[in-house]
Amino acid sequence: MIINKVSEELYSKAVGYIPGGVNSPVRAFRSVGLCPHFIKSGQGSHIVDEDGNDFIDYVCSWGPLILGHANPEVLDAISRTMRDGTSFGAPTRREIDMAELISELVPSIEMVRLVSSGTEATMSAIRLARGYTGREKIVKFSGCYHGHSDGLLAKAGSGAATFSIPDSLGAPKSLVEQTIVLPYNDLEGVRECFQSMPGQIAAIIVEPIAGNMGVVKPLAGFLEGLRDICSSNGSLLIFDEVISGFRVALGGAQELYGVIPDLTCLGKIIGGGLPVGAFGGPRKIMEFLAPVGGVYQAGTLSGNPLAVSAGLATLRILKRDNPYPSLEEKSSRLTRGLAEILSRKSLKNTVNRLGSLFSVFFDMESVTNYEEAIKADKSRFNTFFAKMLDQGIYLAPSAFEAWFVSTAHSDQDIDYTLNCAERSL
Ligand code: KE4
């Protein structure tokens, strides 16, 4: 039985100073109706909260920690860097190393601009696409979440979906009107949209593997179709690979599906747990950015030495060790086990997985878009979540998020998780 006493005390103090007691809404556990646990430390695949409860962690900071918590090589890179200072507001050698490595691992990225979050990356990529094409409209898909910039908070996934706030207060109507929201995996709908607005659409932004309505994979031909539609309409295809980048393959979803976007947005893993985002693409587009071109974008801590050293160390380890086959093996064993337990208990379910990224939908046979995802049995998820938490398994506190497996998750972790699922269901 998990004691949550200290966390409850901390939470009651936190809500006095921080809206909802958290610095990011989904952490508030509101969707699952529980008090959030204040985390004290993490090591490998485990986190420990302020009451001393130990959990196997499948949130992994919402994706960045593909190597697990406090990876020794990553910590070593940060500590070596910080001895020379933390930030200069000037170019550093390390930023070239990072740009070169990203470009090597994601060949469609000839040039890259580092920022401090995924939101900044997608917001800037959209502005760049508008500046490059001279057009204003953008297309996104319901259930996809691309961070919280005004124009992208239309039928967003993740926190917004969890709170079923399809559009956010405060996002100017004039701006959101420029955002067209279509159903994910509906290629015909995209075609019709472009036919109805010839020459007006600057870009499509898409999670090539959606991770913010639960995990939803592209149907065969969907990404290829988006590529063709953008190419024949002079619009840019933007892949938001903040989750999928370096997660599903070293080259991300674009390597896996062989579909090349015009711009790619990155985040999470490329910061190794510190704040880094990035967006990149061909030189002919990227050089529209200031100070070369007329699209302004900036950031005090963009390319921050500490954050870049953590990200560089992480990417170098992924390149050196190629953990993807073992991540695949561990994650498939976990999802097969979960599906088998659910089926044995004759609980209808579907598990959408790609590599070490997956989610479980209760009471659904298949989920290929947001409209289907929201039909999944949320209350059963919430009961499952609470019972797993009580046994020391820390899942994302929302049916609209993903499970993340790291290189630090052991076979024992997987076995124990399956035992807990057996008891929870
Ligand atoms: P950040 O600004 O939170 O670094 O990144 C925004 C973002 C952009 N694109 C995708 C595909 C994303 O998933 C995200 C952020 N993901 C959420 C949860 N899936 C972060 C968790 C949170 O909001 O606290």
Image (cartoon, rainbow, N blue to C red):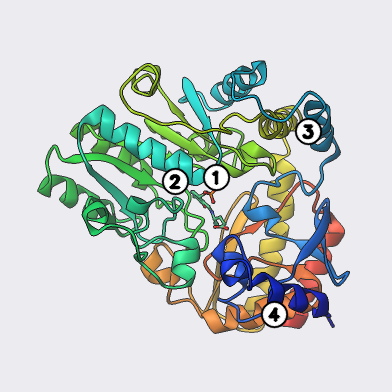
Amino acid tagged 2: Pro
Q: Earlier in the sequence, mark 4 or mark 3?
A: 3
Q: Residue at x 67, y 54 (%)?
A: 61
Say if mark 2 contacts mark 4, CB within 8 Å: no
Say if mark 2 contacts mark 1, CB within 8 Å: yes
Residue 78, label in figure: 3
Residue 244, label in figure: 1
Q: Which residue is mark 2?
A: 208
Are there few (<14), some (14-19), or many (20+) residues within 10 Å of tag 2?
many
Q: Please, what secondary structure does the residue beneath circle 4 have?
A: helix
Q: What is the distance, in whole Å, between disc 2 and disc 1 at their CAs?
A: 8 Å
Closer to the observer: label 1 or label 3?
3
Q: Which residue is mark 4?
A: 386
Q: Residue at x 53, y 27 (%)?
A: 106
Question: Where 104 falls versus 276 (above or below)?
Answer: above
Q: What is the distance, in whole Å, between disc 2 and disc 4 at their CAs?
A: 31 Å
Q: What is the distance, in whole Å, between disc 3 and disc 2 at their CAs?
A: 31 Å
Question: Where 405 falls versus 309 (above or below)?
Answer: below
Q: Earlier in the sequence, mark 1 or mark 3?
A: 3
